[in-house]
Image (spheres, rainbow, N blue to C red):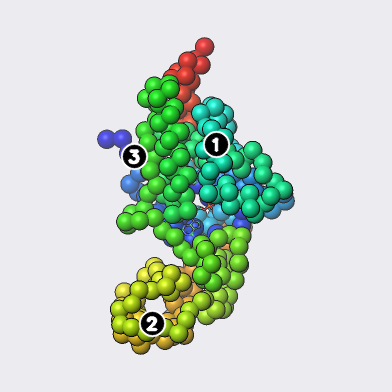
Amino acid sequence: MEKEIVVSGIRPTGYLHLGNYFGAMRNYVRMQDEYNCYFFVADWHSLTTHPDTKELKNSVYRVLAENIACGLDPEKVALYVQSDVKEIAELYLYLNMLAYKGELEKVPTFKDKVRLQPDNVNAGLLTYPVLMTADILIHRATKVPVGKDQEQHLEMARNFAERFNHRYGETFPLPYAFNYNTGLVKIMSLDGNGKMSKSENQMATIFLSDDDELIRKKIMKAKTDAGPQENNSDKPDYIDNLFTLMNLVSKEDTLKKFEDDFNNCNIRYGDMKKQLAEDMALFIHPIREKAAAIQNDKVSLDKIMHEGAEKARASASKTLQLIKESMGLNY
Ligand code: TYM
């Protein structure tokens, strides 16, 4: 039986952080053994918000290195850079004729970006979900491992795929956001303000490149409060986030101890954060060291990048042929 196809990408707009890891990369690593996987660095997407390309090349290498350091095996997956696969741009063009200005203007991520960069509301920003759809459909993927913030983009990808199929005949299977556990993951910022992100409050984001001291400092500063007043109360979201992180990096009995303390109103957040900081430092240490070593080996990274692009182009050109046949552009 043919393996199901998986696609996902990460923008090279800064250092990778725990949100990227637990929302996406952790699943990449697990999926590589079960599926036919295409993982890429979304350098075209980064141009919608980061027109200055001075840091871009370094960032692309770092994202590749960090993915490999987290356990991605370039022999098992196609690991490539988006701009190496020109077929994506051609599909983006076709899909743009099926995407309406009105629906694109309503996308919450577009509205956020308009607020953040009112002087650079470029057409690429508006059609960001269309390019993302092209990334996915170019391999006819069905599973897309992403964090919760990308859920709406996946819904749009399904709409565009359905619209294409309706207009030109059944060509694409429908893609869905994927996580092994139940819901999609959202790691919050340690200051309790929104999601952890590459570009917002750096002291409230834990990067995979942070050293042990910095990790401790950031976690000790994480937002807490006076603690629950009643047994078994609901957790405020910033406290829930600390438990989520503990669940991801600490031992089961450690988590249980603090869960019990919380439920009995005995919790000491200082102790919890100290423990979490130590477990987090242990978790990140090997990734950081491995990524730094890989990043220094540009020769190997170039080889990986080129081989990944070849694998991706082979799949993309096959799909493009199919697309052109469906559209009647096969002269
Ligand atoms: P990007 O670069 O913002 O993030 C990469 C991945 O990390 C996830 N993520 C999070 N998950 C949980 N909690 C967080 N705080 C958090 N922050 C980031 C994102 O959901 C994502 O999975 N548009 C995409 C890149 C992209 C793409 C694609 C993804 C371009 N084309 C095609 C999938 C398929 C983005 O900006 O990701």
Dot 2, how many residues are within 10 Å of its Cα: few (below 14), some (14-19), or many (20+)? some
Residue that carries the numbered disc 1 in the rendered image: 102
Marks 1 and 3, the one that precedes in the sequence:
3
Q: Which mark is residue 4?
A: 3
The answer to which of 291 and 205 lies nearer the viewer is 205
Q: Is disc 3's CB within 8 Å of ligand 1?
A: no
220 lies left or right of 56: left
Where disc 3 sits, the SS reads loop
Residue that appears at 33% across and 77% down: 233
3 or 2: mark nearer the eye: 2
Residue that carries the numbered disc 2 in the rendered image: 228
In space, the residues marked 3 and 2 are separated at their CA atoms by: 46 Å
Residue that appears at 59% across and 44% down: 45
Dot 1, how many residues are within 10 Å of its Cα: few (below 14), some (14-19), or many (20+)? few
Residue that appears at 52% across and 63% down: 194
Q: Amino acid at mark 2?
A: Pro
Report whether residue 163 is seen.
yes
Callout 1 touching callout 2 (CB < 8 Å):
no
In space, the residues marked 1 and 2 are separated at their CA atoms by: 45 Å
Image quarter for residue 247?
A: bottom left
Q: Amino acid at mark 3?
A: Glu
